[in-house]
Amino acid sequence: MKYYKQPKVAKILRNIARYTLLFLISITFIFALLSGSKDYGEGFTGILKNRPNTLPWLLLFLLLFIAWKRKLLGGIIVTLFGLYLMYFFYSPQHFYLSSFILTLIITLLGFFFILSWYLRKNK
């Protein structure tokens, strides 16, 4: 890759990782908050009782914030978290392609943060 294009590619990778991850976390957080709330009762109380389902996605929000400020550290942590989610959601009896794709995308976006840091460092 040519010298003058590395910072531009790094910026594109960083922005793809930031905003795609923010979008995915937001959508998944809302889904996790609302999906099981009917089991606890309808309305706001059901949503409040269903809050524990959102804890992994709140943690991912925190990891995204770290990656936003420190690309290498955050990228490593997001990648490892994505791999952990992939392991956690994998079950031969209950394999869901949508969960696999979501965790694969999270892992890939964490790698984008690392690659962005690397390209910036070696410009």
Image (cartoon, grey):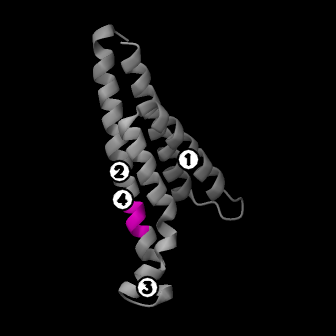
Residue highlighted by disc 3: 46
- Element type at marker 1? helix
Measure how far apart labels 1 and 3 are at the Cα level: 28 Å
Report the amino acid beneath label 3.
Gly
Measure how far apart labels 2 and 3 are at the Cα level: 25 Å
Report the amino acid beneath label 2.
Leu
x, y percent for residue 79: 53, 40
Residue highlighted by disc 4: 26
Report if residue 78 lies within the magenta region: no
Residue highlighted by disc 1: 81
Q: Is residue 54 left or right of residue 123?
A: right
Q: Which is nearer the N-term, disc 2 or disc 3?
A: 2
- Element type at marker 3? helix
Residue found at the far right of this picture: 92
Q: Nearer the viewer, residue 1 or 53?
A: 53
Q: Is residue 96 left or right of residue 36?
A: right
- The rendered magenta stretch, by its main secondary structure, is classed as helix
- In what quadrant of the picture does the C terminus appear? top left
Image quadrant assignment for residue 34: bottom left
Residue highlighted by disc 2: 22
Q: Nearer the viewer, residue 19 or 95?
A: 19
Q: Are marks 4 and 2 in contact (CB under 8 Å)?
A: yes
Relative vertical location of residue 115 with respect to residue 61 in this rendering, above or below: above
x, y percent for residue 86: 60, 50
x, y percent for residue 66: 42, 42
Residue found at the far bottom of this picture: 41
Give the residues drawn in magenta, as a range. Answer: 27-31
Q: Are marks 4 and 1 in contact (CB under 8 Å)?
A: no
In the image, which disc is placed on residue 7? Answer: none
